[in-house]
Amino acid sequence: MRHMIARRAVLGAGLTAALGGASIRAVAQSRIASAGLGCYVGNPNGNDSKEMSTFEQSFDRFAAALGAAPAFMNAFTDFSGSWDKWVANAGWLAWSWSQSSRSRHLTPVIGLPMATNADWATQPAVGTFRDITAGRHDAVWSGIVAAWRDNGYRTMYLRPGYEMNGSFMPWFMGRDASSIDAWSAAFARISSVARTVPNVHVRIVWNPVCINDSGADVASGYPGDAAVDVIGIDLYNNFWPRSLYSFSTGTTEPSLASWRRDPANRTHFWDYPGATRGAPTGQTGVGWGMVRALAFALEHDKPVAVCETGVGVNPQHPEHGLADDGEFPNYLQSRLFAAGAPRVEFINIWDVNVGDGNWRFSDGSKPSTLAGWRNALSRAGLRPT
């Protein structure tokens, strides 16, 4: 997550009491994973015992805080290097996962790049997309899937070109029909190749980011039902409203600080991030929000998955979020599990502090957020009540 919707120890006595004295070790070692609950708490490192210990402590703290162990976790393929390095990187990460009792039995949700850092100079990287479609990187896609399979992961979710509707990704799909068509064709090629790898079950996720302006109709980048198994949703609690009009009061707020105090305004943004006073549900083809994502999944008879979500703020833009927001988890539950909503395959909650956002909550620093996640997951049936 970037500018438009900014993203990316020991329990304190108060949190321990809130958990009813739950033991981190007991939760972690129970191996009773909650179907549908996922996380991102950082990466295991099989070559560094200190980093591995930090990962396992973070994983245990997450499970103890929520009272349920996750069954899914995010993984990312490093695209900073050249194409010939990707398979080795995936193999090392899959091996590192297999070295920890925490991640050994998880289902990976793998972010699959569609460009390298070198493609920033030609964004949108239409030439690269066409190379993918022509099959010039087929060995990369099949190699990544095989690397995870060979380390014991027989079911995995792939997110090719995740958050492609944001210009903050080098594989940005672009704003014109020709670029978007090239991106879609490349996605379809990756999907086809990944599914040919034997002895592994691959689920393909089409994964836009919820954003207030995409420069083109996000739906135009859909590669077709045959290439997609799941509609992915990336949504954090941040907000970048296109206007400060309050749809609950019918007035324009004098500042973002006053606008954000009303939970109804934040909810309206998460539903319709491109909304303005004249277009309360957003302009056609502008932006992408929760309501549109769920409707799109229903239109195409696909389940949904929340591939990334969390509560926090970007330290460079703290005014565009609430650092401790108990409303947001319950908002997600109310939309995802409403009557008639598409089936939810998983929700990956971020509990980590990264450069463009501090989403950590299990350390007791965000009591409202923790209470919100526990309540929302209980109501969704993703943790014991």
Image (cartoon, rainbow, N blue to C red):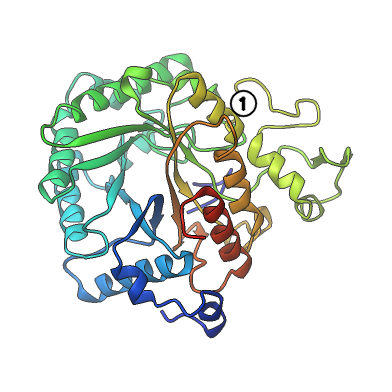
Task: State whether residue 192 is above or below residue 121.
Answer: above
Question: Which residue is depicted at the point 58% across and 58% down?
Answer: 375
Q: Position of 234 compared to 338: left or right?
A: left
Q: Identify residue type, mark 1.
A: Val
Q: Considering depth in this image, is 284 or 2 the residue closer to the camera?
A: 284
Q: Which residue position holds label 1?
A: 286
Q: Horizontal and vertical percent for residue 112?
A: 30, 39
Question: Which residue is depicted at the point 20% across and 30% down?
Answer: 194
Report the number of numbered marks. 1
Question: Which residue is depicted at the point 57% across and 37% down?
Answer: 211
Residue 114 quadrant: top left
Kindly state the secondary structure of the residue where label 1 is placed.
Answer: loop
Residue 249 quadrant: top right
In the displayed orientation, state which residue is furthest to the bottom.
Answer: 13
Q: Horizontal and vertical percent for residue 264?
A: 76, 45
Q: Position of 324 compared to 46: left or right?
A: right
Q: Horizontal and vertical percent for residue 359?
A: 51, 61
Question: Which residue is depicted at the point 19% across and 60% down?
Answer: 96
Does the rendering let one see residue 312? no
In the displayed orientation, state which residue is furthest to the front.
Answer: 385
Q: Position of 117 compared to 319: left or right?
A: left
Q: Horizontal and vertical percent for residue 213?
A: 60, 32
Does the rendering let one see residue 38? yes
Q: Position of 77 compared to 300: left or right?
A: left
